[in-house]
Image (spheres, grey):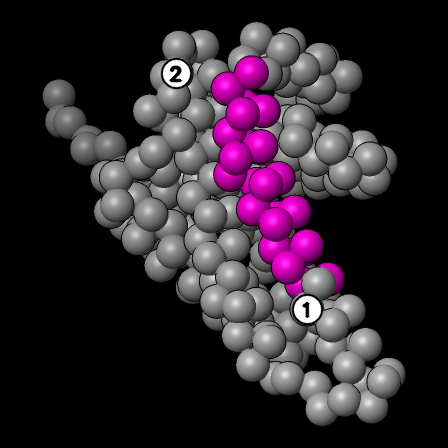
Amino acid sequence: MKEIDFQDLLIDAWNKFKERWKPLCVASLLGYFVPFIAFMVCYMFILFGFMASTKYGYEPDVAAFIPLFIALPILFIVLFLFTIGTENYCMKICRGENPDNKDFFLPAKTYLRVIAAEFLVMLIANIGIIVCIVPGLILLFFFSLVSYAVIDHPELGIIDCMKLSWRLVKQYWKPILILDIIVYALQSVISSTVVGLIPVVPFGILVTSLLYTKFNDESAAHPQPQNEPNVIPPTYQA
């Protein structure tokens, strides 16, 4: 495995982000920031109302939480659609293509495949967490590229996409882990401004997309040699 220059990779990701910052930020604004802020405002409004009722001795109205229970799954769906669409859009950027706004949307079959793959990942990871927290986190790390594999390889089955994620992360675990830590640190600092969530979320997806496309395409161009059975050459008589 070649040594990865993290500075060059981050600079490359930043240059690609600058070229496409407008559609990425608009998608983040509409698909992540606005739904998230709207949900938090609704949550805080209901929570403060509940606390005020308790403070002044009124019977808290449990029915007030019904809008929250409705809004929560809607938020998850919107964030899921945004994330998967942005991953597809960013992979095209990383491969030098010229993506259009329609690339933020994928066929329904792809979304269902991603949901099935993520469900299996969470099921396996939860078993690992029940046994011990660390194995569950390790499993989540090794399956962190599953959604990219499902989007990128519609010809593969879900299990094969999970195997692909496992193989790529296993082969390139060090650069992926280091970049994940760097991106997490950047997101923690920039997102503290709240508005910084708009650019930093798609930038993080772009960095991961760059890692995936780089390692996936390298693996496809240079497949691992398979062990061949020992064949005894025939002996020819003079």
- Quadrant occupied by the N terminus: top right
Give the secondary structure at mark 2. loop
Q: Per the image, is 37 magenta?
A: yes
Residue 183 or residue 200, whichever sits in front: 200
| Vertical order, 135 against 205 (above or below) | below
Q: Find out whether residue 42 is within the magenta segment.
A: yes
Name the residue beneath numbered marker 2: 99
Q: Amino acid at mark 2?
A: Pro
Residue at position x 39%, y 10% in the image: 98
Is residue 155 something that shows in the picture?
Answer: yes
Instruction: Please name the residue that numbered disc 1 is placed on.
Output: 46
Q: Secondary structure at mark 1?
A: helix
Q: Name the residue: 64% across, 21% down.
A: 2
- Residue at left 34%, top 33%? 105
Q: Amino acid at mark 1?
A: Ile
Residue 115, horizontal then vertical, whole percent: 38, 56
Residue 92 or residue 74, whichever sits in front:
74
Q: Decide: is 128 above or below 95.
A: below
Q: Position of residue 71 (x, y in %)?
A: 51, 61
Q: Which residues are magenta?
A: 22-44
Looking at the picture, tell me which residue is in the foreground, 132 or 63. 63
Q: Is residue 63 above or below residue 185?
A: below
| Residue 177 falls left or right of residue 212 | right
The image's mark for residue 167 is none
